[in-house]
Image: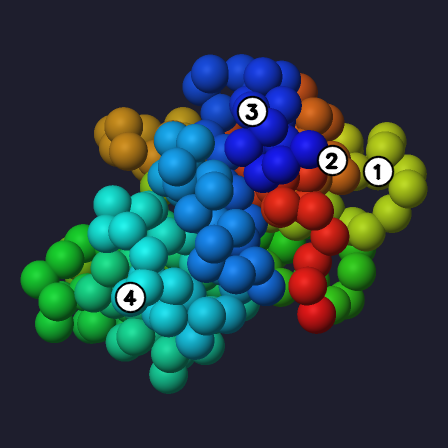
Amino acid sequence: MGVAKNLQAVKDVIPSHVTLVAVSKTKPDEVILEAYQAGHRDFGENKVQDLVGKQERLPADIRWHMIGHLQSNKVKYLAPFVHLLHGVDSLKLLGVINREAEKNDRVIDCLFQVRIALEETKFGLPEEDLKQLIQSDEFAAMDHVRIRGLMGMATYTENSNQIREEFRQLKRIFDRLKASQFKNQESFDQLSCGMSGDYALAIEEGSNLVRIGSLIFGPRNY
């Protein structure tokens, strides 16, 4: 099957309210163009250098998602164009994003990354730290970032019950924040979790943004 058919097969089983980010990391431009020509516009990359290069070479109406861990010193390269930053996990990083967005006369949409996995290697903020960040004066003063919701990555495990519970935990945190700190902000509406191996579980537990690569493009190129 080609990329267009793979893409359609995924779209056929995803509800219409769920945004599909096609994870194009490690993939060449011509493969991304296949998905683009099939009508897809949301693509995700995890390395700043790759994202910037592809943005310069590929059609201007692509919505580029930065889905990897973002270092503060690289924000300036993405600030002019990035559609959504998925992995904001510190007040310091958010402050840099706010400054670079202001320089570009933009408001940049962001997701807070919450740590739901048991693995030490996963990034993200614990719920208490996230609450403190949101309640801080520094956060209140930032007017060039818009928090669209939360992102989380489940533990890499075959245990689907554990994965489901971690997604459920993320949804509970989202609901608590939506009812408190973000209760007057309709734009706080994105819950991003679920990838090629667990997106169906994630959608069942409330995800409305999934990141899928290998099911569309095949195995990663290293």
Question: How far separated are the C-alphas under marks 1 and 2?
Answer: 11 Å
Q: Amino acid at mark 1?
A: Gln
Question: How far separated are the C-alphas under marks 3 and 4?
Answer: 26 Å
Give me the residue at 58% from left, 38% from top: 3
Q: Nearer the viewer, mark 3 or mark 1?
A: 3
Locate residue 99: give its quadrant: bottom left
Of 133 and 87, nearer the camera is: 87
**Left or right side of 75 for 150:** right
Question: Could you tell which of marks 2 and 4 lies nearer the N-terminus?
Answer: 4
Dot 3: what SS? helix
Q: How would you rate the neighbour count of disc 2 (Cα within 10 Å): few for under 14, some for 14-19, many for 20 or more?
A: some
Dot 4: what SS? helix
Q: Which residue is mark 2?
A: 198
- The circle drawn on residue 162 is 1
Q: Nearer the viewer, mark 2 or mark 4?
A: 4
In the rendered image, residue 106, in percent from the top left (x then y), is placed at 14, 57
Question: How far separated are the C-alphas under marks 3 and 1?
Answer: 29 Å
**Left or right side of 56 for 43:** right
Q: Nearer the viewer, mark 1 or mark 2?
A: 2
Give me the residue at 81% from left, 51% from top: 156
Give me the residue at 37% from left, 83% from top: 73
Q: Which residue is mark 4?
A: 56
Q: Which residue is mark 3?
A: 8
